[in-house]
Image (tube, helix red, strand yellow):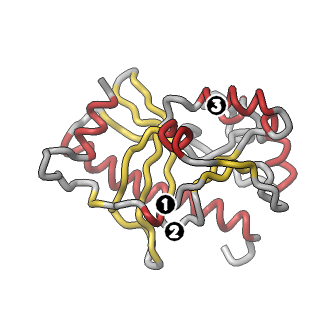
Amino acid sequence: MDSLNKWQRDFLKGKQDREVIVNILNDFFQKNCPGIKIVREHEHLKSMTVQEKVKNNTIENRWNSSPFYNAMGLDYLICKGNAKIPLMIRFSNDAGFYLKLPKECLKDREAMIRYLEFLEFDYVLFVRRDKSGVTADICGPTPFMNILNNCNCSKMEAIGNTNRLQFSYKPKDTDYHPYDEVSMLGDSFLNRILELMK
């Protein structure tokens, strides 16, 4: 991994850390509610050059029908039978909460608004990650629309990040709890997932 550049290392690290928490949660579902499973929206992802990423960063290539050599993103689906709920996974030590925009949205405000409306039914799962790696502490899943409607956001201007929509939301300030913990009110991660899958 030492021979890789920063964006390749970041891509692989993000992919691996997501696999850690997804495996933990899928083991939990298997024992407590068989039939629910979290799967990656794009089963296979190619590590792309900067030029390939620029070319392939389209709305179409963010859909699950894209072939692996065009597929973009690290998002997941919570599945139960035919029901599927889109899931973004983010980490507590991320600098902030941001959304990568397809290139159709970069210079067209109306296209960006339509794309955000397309994400109306997506959820975000925040996972605690510290220096030793991913933990089993989570927050959510939270409706993406709650973040969109309650946090200021703006398109980033920094070189290399101009396709990001940055939100005034700090994952480090979120309350994290073990995924298998039940609150005094009987709420649990599993109950929240079952409620979403109705």
Q: CA distance from mark 1 to mark 2?
A: 7 Å
For the C terminus, the quadrant is top left
Packing grade of label 1 (10 A; few <14, some 14-19, many >=20) is: many
Is the residue under label 2 in contact with that under label 1 (CB below 8 Å)? yes
Q: Secondary structure at mark 2?
A: loop
Residue at horizontal 75 percent and vertical 49 percent from the top: 155
User: Residue 113 location, x and y as percent?
Assistant: 69, 30
Packing grade of label 3 (10 A; few <14, some 14-19, many >=20) is: some
Residue to which mark 1 is pinned: 171
One can see residue 10 in this view: yes
For the residue marked with disc 2, what is the amino acid? Answer: Asn
Could you say which quadrant of the image residue 149 lies in? top right
Q: Secondary structure at mark 1?
A: helix
Please tell me which residue lies in front, 79 or 103: 103
Image: 179 above or below 147: below
Label whose residue precedes the other's in the sequence (2 or 3): 3
For the residue marked with disc 3, what is the amino acid? Answer: Trp
Q: Secondary structure at mark 3?
A: loop
For the residue marked with disc 1, what is the amino acid? Answer: Pro
User: Residue 154 location, x and y as percent?
Assistant: 71, 49
Residue to which mark 3 is pinned: 63
Residue to which mark 2 is pinned: 93
Residue at horizontal 37 percent and vertical 48 percent from the top: 140
Please tell me which residue lies in front, 112 or 17: 112
In the picture provided, is 148 more to the left or to the right than 7? left
Image: 165 above or below 113: below
User: Residue 150 location, x and y as percent?
Assistant: 52, 43
